[in-house]
Image: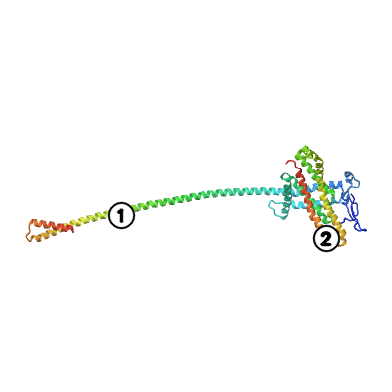
Amino acid sequence: MGMTLMDGEMLQLVNINPSTIVFTLINTLIILLLYTFFLHKPVMKILEQRKEQIGNEMKAAEDAQKEAEAIKAEYTSKLKESQEEAAQIVSAAVKRAGERENQIIAEAQQEAADLKKKAEESIELEKKKAINEIKDQISDIVIMASEKVCEKEISKSDNEALINKFIAEVGNK
Amino acid sequence: MMPISLNILAEEEFTVNGPLRSIPLPFLNDIVGEENACIAESVVTQWVVMVILAVVFFILGRNLKVKPETKRQVVAEWIVNFFVGNVETSMGTYYKKRYAPYIGALFCFCILSCLMGLFGFRNPTADVSVTGTWAIITFVLVLWTKIRTGGFKGYLHSFIEPLPFMLPFNIIGDFANPISQAMRLFGNNLSGMVIGGLVYFALGSFAIAVPAVLSLYFDLFSAVIQSYIFCTLTMSYVAMADMSE
């Protein structure tokens, strides 16, 4: 340590030495300048730049996010619109199909009714026709029968009564 | 005050001296008003410290990038942020930019001065002229802060606050702070030196392990703590002197 019995002139242990004070002051100032200009200012400058850059980047990110959100909102509304449109189209189609269905059913019913009516009419006609034919045939038969009967003795009144009775019987069949 | 001398054994004597006068500088004679004025050893050690710090600051502070690429830059930023953060915590935002460089420089200077003891130099902080100078700087800063925030009238008025009879205590307080600050750093480091010297002296040729442990405590631990305390005191004295709040 070199503290015992050193050669050379020593200052006192607790001494106020003006030259030491002056030099310490100067040295401290120089250290202050060294620290300030070699370390403090460059680092602070870099920190400031970094802060600025991060701020800019954050702002850019925020802007991008806002933009993305706007686009998202736009697409969402568009999607909603198109969904609504699709739903409208479907419901319109369903409605139209329902109408068409009813119309087809109505038409078919109408047609069926027409056919039925026509059939009934033709049946009626045929029936009448058949009845008339039968009547004609019966008259013929009756005439033939009466001719046969006339070969026997029969009064005119008896004859007519007989014919009418026969016709009535036939008519009832 | 005379050098400390201890008569431990009748034949041997243990002496602790003040800093060695090393280099005579003739031009100092007129300035200091002494004959044969010399530069003290503490100043020479300070020059060594200054050279080391200049190199360290220069290496740490160059080629900094916005996106850190080197560990060196991380260390540099950590150091600067440490002082800026400490100053902001103890003194507030106004002082942050103004005092962070001074506190940083003072702390680096102080701590490296203390560590020079490890390399066989005489610890400059064990010289009361050195710690005294730093305390004088603190005193001037405190004075300036008081006048700046309170005006000269406010400064004078602060001596009779809260009551006029406090005047002598306030005057003593103003001077006691820097003196105690200087003495604390000086005393701690000097005591380390003295105890280290005594242990070496007492152990004689058996001085292995034990001085190393003591040196670890006095030159490393105590040096860091005392430097930190000195800087913290400087900050709090200046912050307390602010009368604007």
For image coordinates 24% across by 56% down, the residue present is A123
Q: CA distance from mark 1 to mark 2?
A: 126 Å
Q: Quadrant of residue A141?
A: bottom left
Near mark 1 (Cα within 10 A), the count class, few <14, some 14-19 or many ≥20, is few
Residue A47 picture location, percent across and down: 70, 49
- The residue identified by callout 1 is A112
Residue A120 picture location, percent across and down: 25, 55
For image coordinates 63% across by 49% down, the residue present is A58
Relative side of B18 to B55, left or right: right
Residue B118 picture location, percent across and down: 82, 56
Instruction: Mark 1 vs mark 2: give the one in front.
Output: 2
Q: Quadrant of residue A115?
A: bottom left
Outermost residue, top side: B153
For image coordinates 11% across by 60% down, the residue present is A145
Residue B67 picture location, percent across and down: 68, 52
- Name the chain under label 2: B
Element assignment for label 1: helix
| Above-or-below relation of B11 to A38 | below
The C terminus of chain A, quarter of image: bottom left
Element assignment for label 2: helix
- Disc 1 residue type? Ala
For image coordinates 37% across by 53% down, the residue present is A101
- The residue identified by callout 2 is B210
In the rendered image, is residue A26 in sight?
Answer: no
Near mark 2 (Cα within 10 A), the count class, few <14, some 14-19 or many ≥20, is some
- Name the chain under label 1: A
